[in-house]
Amino acid sequence: MMVSDVGFRTRVVRTLRYAAPTVVGILLGFYLGRQREPSPPAVPPPIPSVQESGERLRLPPLASKKNPIETAVATRLRLARDIEVVGSVSYDADHFADVGPLIAGRIVSLEVGTGDTVKAGQVLAALESSEVGQAQAAYLTARAGTLAAQANLRRERELAERRVSSVRERELAEAQAAIEDAGLAAATQRLRALGLRPEDIKALERSGGWPGRVPLVSPIAGVVLTRKVSLGQAVQAASDAFQVANLSWLWVELELFEKDLSFVNKEQKVMLRTEVYPGKTFPARVAYVGQVIDEKTRTAQVRIEFQNAEGLFRPGQFVTATLLGDPARAKTEVLAVPRKAVQTVEGKPLVFVAEADGTFSKRSVELGISGGAQIEVRSGLTAGERVATDGGFLLKSELLR
């Protein structure tokens, strides 16, 4: 046992004698290599233009002077909800007309074309019809009979006053005159039903007019949108020959969900926007709120009227309508701040609250309904706190740097 221990020790000592120089060399090389590696240069920290203290921000004096930050007080007030929805522009039915013949015939003249501006009462085309000719002849016959009966009545009255004629003859003359008057009235009504105007009937009395012709007249002032007839074309009664619209007045058709209908009322103010004219708004009003809910879409029709005096809108165009809430209809008060006080960071709303020491603290908030220039804050603020409005975006941009 003693001999084995002595041999083991001898082998260990011999091993260490040969291994020691190698280990020492490895350690020395590692140390010298660490000494030759250059140390990374020190990067000075950025100098922020906004000083942060926890969640607080402060603009430097120069920046504050160039871009002063205005504030507003969070206040409890009655806030009515605005509703924003996309709708389509359509014709105003009170300023739109389909013009067509009331009787079958043939187009013998065309006075206007598509795109022409017309006045109320202007002739668009003329229609020739045998039935119109018969009605005109009947009118002229009835008028002649009426003139004769009136002349006979005057004569009988004069004779009756001089006692040359009997009372019976005078009464017969009066009855005949009344019959002829009734026949003339019926003939006149017939011409009016066929589309002749009073001035057309007067022209017929003077010179016989245009035999068998009736004008197609625009009942409104506007623009000819379509002309569906051509010269010499045969048309049927009640067919559409022209479409005329006054585009100075238009409608916007909306579909509102039933949950929003309680916030809408007739004569409510509306602001319209369109991507065609960015940054511009156009005033309008609610003209009609539908009383029936569509079973499939669960929406009701809401119609908006607006004046298109400059001709900037066209039927078929899409617009965004903001129905402005009426604070007088709001039942309760809510805590609200100006819309421009709310900033969005990483998809979450926040405001910058002004502190007594001149700094601004970032405050996450939960928003509610919005109305006009105000928006409800359900949590994150208390009444009386001041929030940054104009210039708040500067604090946001510096916060994100």
Image: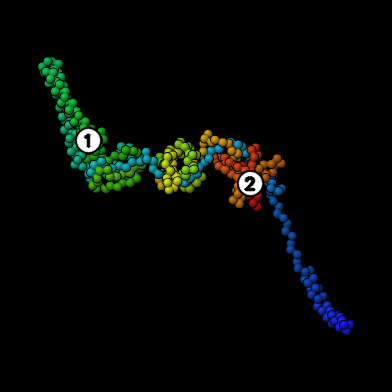
Q: Amino acid at mark 2?
A: Ser
Horizontal side, residue 111 vs residue 371: left or right? left
Which disc is residue 190 wearing? 1
Tell me the residue at 48%/48% (across/down): 275
Whether residue 280 is visible: no
- Residue 46 screen position, x and y as percent: 70, 54
For the N terminus, which image quadrant?
bottom right
Which disc is residue 229 wearing? none
- Residue 177 screen position, x and y as percent: 17, 25
Label 1 and label 2: CA atoms lie apart by 77 Å
Q: Quadrant of residue 212?
A: top left
Q: Which of the two labelled residues, at mark 1 and mark 2, occupies the earlier sequence position?
A: 1
Residue furthest right in the image: 2
Tell me the residue at 33%/41% (across/down): 97
Q: Is residue 197 above or below residue 156?
A: below
Horizontal side, residue 380 vs residue 23: left or right? left
Q: Is residue 399 above or below residue 248?
A: below
- Kindly check if marks 1 and 2 are in contact, taking CB atoms under 8 A apart as contact: no
Closer to us: 385 or 366 = 366
Q: Amino acid at mark 1?
A: Arg
Tell me the residue at 85%/81% (across/down): 8
Of badges 1 and 2, nearer the viewer stands 2
Horizontal side, residue 98 vs residue 214: left or right? right
- Residue 86 screen position, x and y as percent: 47, 46
**Residue carrying label 2:** 364
Please tell me how crowded label 2 is: few (under 14), some (14-19), or many (20+) other residues with Cα within 10 Å. Answer: some
